[in-house]
Image (cartoon, rainbow, N blue to C red):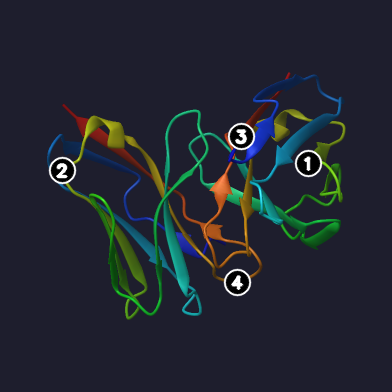
Amino acid sequence: NAGVMQNPRHLVRRRGQEARLRCSPMKGHSHVYWYRQLPEEGLKFMVYLQKENIIDESGMPKERFSAEFPKEGPSILRIQQVVRGDSAAYFCASSPMGRDYGYTFGSGTRLTVV
Amino acid sequence: GESVGLHLPTLSVQEGDNSIINCAYSNSASDYFIWYKQESGKGPQFIIDIRSNMDKRQGQRVTVLLNKTVKHLSLQIAATQPGDSAVYFCAENGAGNMLTFGGGTRLMVKP
């Protein structure tokens, strides 16, 4: 039973390009969360999705960021027109039944904007 | 602002000693708490959790204590080993649909 799979592990983008981060939750998990982590800081919530639905995007920047979790395939976090401040580690977590049960995290995608 | 905070950003202990990492939370409605361990370059790893109807829960070498009166959570690691060196986060299911994480404490184990 594979854990939460994130790819790519490392992503380098030039300013103005688009970044696409993928997350496949654990088998049987239908709740997906994206968090962002800056160096030496904690995890900041971005968005919570279930299949084909965005449940809570209160942590997402209003512009350039979007997320989806289609019926088939992985969840995608998309950042358009990246800027240097987007450089961070982005972690995906999945849960079988929401926030009242432990999350399983992936290994993250480290985005570097140059 | 954050509803979960930690008192010490860095904790240094001798190998073999016990470690205690503390966490304060502000949302009295939170009823589920988790400790995560994050090693360098890796994602957070679940260590132990506790629900608000308990005040203590033990795992292998780890114990979580919950004091709801003062809204305080602690993680105790017995016989700390070099492999325990990491950043430790507490999390709570406070407001909203997600777990809220504290800022983290770095545990350094001296051989």
- Residue B7, compared with residue A65, is above or below; it is below
Residue closest to the eye, A22 or B89: A22
Chain-order first, disc 2 or disc 4: 2
Left or right for A89, reference B2: right
Which residue is disc 3 drawn over?
A: A108
Which amino acid type is marked by label 3?
A: Gly
**Which residue is pictured at 87% across the width and 31% down the height?**
A81
Mark 4 or mark 3, which is nearer to you?
3
Answer with the quarter of the image where residue B68 lies. Answer: bottom left
**Which residue is pictured at 76% across the width and 52% down the height?**
A60
Which amino acid type is marked by label 2?
A: Ala
Q: Residues within 10 Å of mark 4 (few under 14, many from 20)?
A: few
Between the residue at mark 2 and the residue at mark 1, the CA separation in whole angstroms equals: 41 Å
Which residue is disc 4 drawn over?
A: B95
Q: Residues within 10 Å of mark 2 (few under 14, many from 20)?
A: some
Q: Residues within 10 Å of mark 1 (few under 14, many from 20)?
A: some
Mark 2 or mark 1, which is nearer to you?
1
Between the residue at mark 1 and the residue at mark 3, the CA separation in whole angstroms equals: 14 Å
Which amino acid type is marked by label 1?
A: Pro
Which residue is disc 2 drawn over?
A: B79
Badge 1 marks a residue whose secondary structure is: loop
